[in-house]
Image: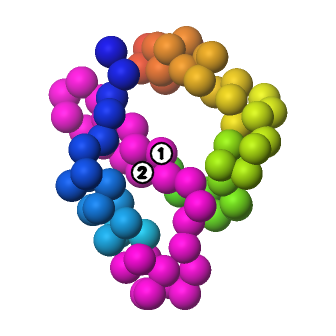
Amino acid sequence: MALTFDAATKELFGVLREEMRRTEKYCWGICDLVVDRPGRFRFNFCYDPPKRINGIFDEESMGRFERYLEAYKAERTGE
């Protein structure tokens, strides 16, 4: 099942990005939100320009989606 963001979630991500830009004087181009089954979450920020939005579909920008499940399992089991 794919996770989709509603308008309120997108707006809150925009508020977060703007607040971080205001306080840190730069803003992130990519934010990955990782949510675990028990409800724990973490944010991974990248300050490079977003590749997929700029038409770059290389291994770095797309490959992680192909390996996501295996990486997730390995992270949880310590393999």
Residue 4 x, y percent position in the rendering: 32, 33
Q: Which numbered circle lies on residue 41? A: none
Question: Sequence-wise, which precedes: disc 2 or disc 1?
Answer: 1
Residue beneath disc 2 = 43
The three-letter amino acid code for the residue at tag 1 is Asp
Total marks in image: 2
Q: Quadrant of the N terminus?
A: top left
In this view, the residue in front, 1 or 41, is 1
Residue 11 x, y percent position in the rendering: 29, 62
Q: Is the residue marked by circle 1 packed among few (<14), some (14-19), or many (20+) residues within 10 Å?
A: few
Above or below — where is 22 with respect to 68? below
- Whether residue 37 is in magenta: the answer is yes
Answer with left or right where residue 59 lies relative to residue 48: right
Secondary structure at badge 1 equals strand
Coloration of the structure image: rainbow
Residue beneath disc 1 = 32
Residue 79 x, y percent position in the rendering: 55, 13
Residue 21 x, y percent position in the rendering: 48, 80
- Whether residue 39 is in magenta: the answer is yes
Q: Check contact, mark 2 vs mark 1: CB within 8 A.
A: yes
Identity of the residue drawn at 48% across and 45% down: 32
Q: Tell me if residue 39 can be seen.
A: yes
Identity of the residue drawn at 42% across and 20% down: 76
Q: Which residues are magenta?
A: 18-43
In this view, the residue in front, 49 or 6, is 6
The three-letter amino acid code for the residue at tag 2 is Phe
- The picture quadrant where one finds residue 63 is top right
